[in-house]
Amino acid sequence: MMAKASFQAAVIRFRLYEYRAGLKALRGVSTMPSGSADVSSILDRILDAATDNLRIAKILVQMGLDPNNVTYDAIFNRLLEIFVHNITLANLFAAVGAVFFVATLLMRTMVPLRVANMIGCALFAVFGALSANVSTFLLYLLLLPINALRLRQMLKLVKKARHAAEGDMSIEWLKPFMTERKYRHGDTLFRLGDPANEMLLTVTGKFLVKEINVEIGPGTLMGELGFLTPDNRRTGTIECIEDGQVLTITYDRLLEIYFQDPQFGYYFLVLTSQRLLQNIDRLQKQLATERAAATNRIA
């Protein structure tokens, strides 16, 4: 190992000497002004310093090793000595904090990622305090409440979605992520087969699904099935029959919330499935009523 390293260093030094000699020869036949000659002298000094610093023996001495006794045991003992010398309470907090920060890079879901990040920030803040590094202490101390706020929002989102899956069809939890929009009587929100890129929640007013002649009142989701269809197309035509207000959220925003926490995505699918089952049940009842009416007319 020592012989190979020495050979590589010798090759590098030879190349540097060769390059320096070429510069000197070029300077000797050049007609450049004295200012350029000074630049060449500076380059020579830089190359001399680089050649000197590339000597294996000098590097080993700087590392605290004996150039005449380079063994694996000597290297291990030196590294252990450096490690033991730098063991302090502050560095221990920093090392554990680094472990938690690396863990955040390996996590796929947002809630455990936020928790690990908060623990890492707390440990690094302690490191900054113990090492009297004010900038480090303030930086990670500031990151703690930011992560705590985001974690609280995500837990609240998951909790509300879980309630929806358990039977509470309210989607109040989704309103902070939605945008307000108003419609007047006669406006068409979307038509059957139109490209779908957003979901709507009615707040006031009345709307009509024209294909099945069903009225939609306040507090009802519209357009959620377009989020689930492969080609993102509208499955019906909805027209405003009474001035009202709706809240909208784009499918891109829904996907963003889903990827922040896949558990939310699961509960959202449960919620939309319940909505779909309600629509099917309503259509079945409507069909049964029409059949009964047709039977009575025949009788």
Image (cartoon, helix red, strand yellow):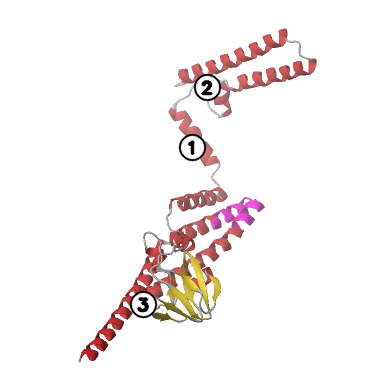
CB of mark 3 within 8 Å of CB of mark 2? no
User: Furthest residue to the front?
Assistant: 298
Q: Distance between the residues labelled 1 and 3?
A: 77 Å
Q: What stretch is highlighted in magenta?
A: 121-140
Q: What residue type is labelled 3?
A: Ile
Quarter of the image for residue 42 reads top right
Q: What residue type is labelled 1?
A: Leu
Split into 4 quadrants, where in the image is the N terminus? Answer: top left
Q: Is residue 217 shown above or below 17?
A: below
Secondary structure under the numbered disc 3 in the rendered image: loop
Identify residue for label 2.
Answer: 67
Secondary structure under the numbered disc 1 in the rendered image: helix
Mark 2 or 1, nearer chain start: 2
Q: Name the residue at 53% across, 71% down.
A: 176
Identify residue for label 1.
Answer: 80
Identify residue for label 3.
Answer: 212
Q: Which of 287 and 45 is in front in this view?
A: 287
Dot 2: few (<14), some (14–19), or many (≥20) neighbours within 10 Å? some
Indicate left or right for 238 with 63 as reference.
left
- Discs 1/3, front: 3
Q: What residue type is labelled 2?
A: Pro
User: Furthest residue to the left?
Assistant: 299
Question: Residue 188: percent from the left, percent from the top?
Answer: 48, 73
Q: Nearer the viewer, residue 124 or 143?
A: 143
Q: Is residue 154 shown above or below 65?
A: below
Question: Residue 60: percent from the left, percent from the top?
Answer: 54, 25
Mark 3 or 2, nearer chain start: 2
Mark 1 or 3, nearer chain start: 1
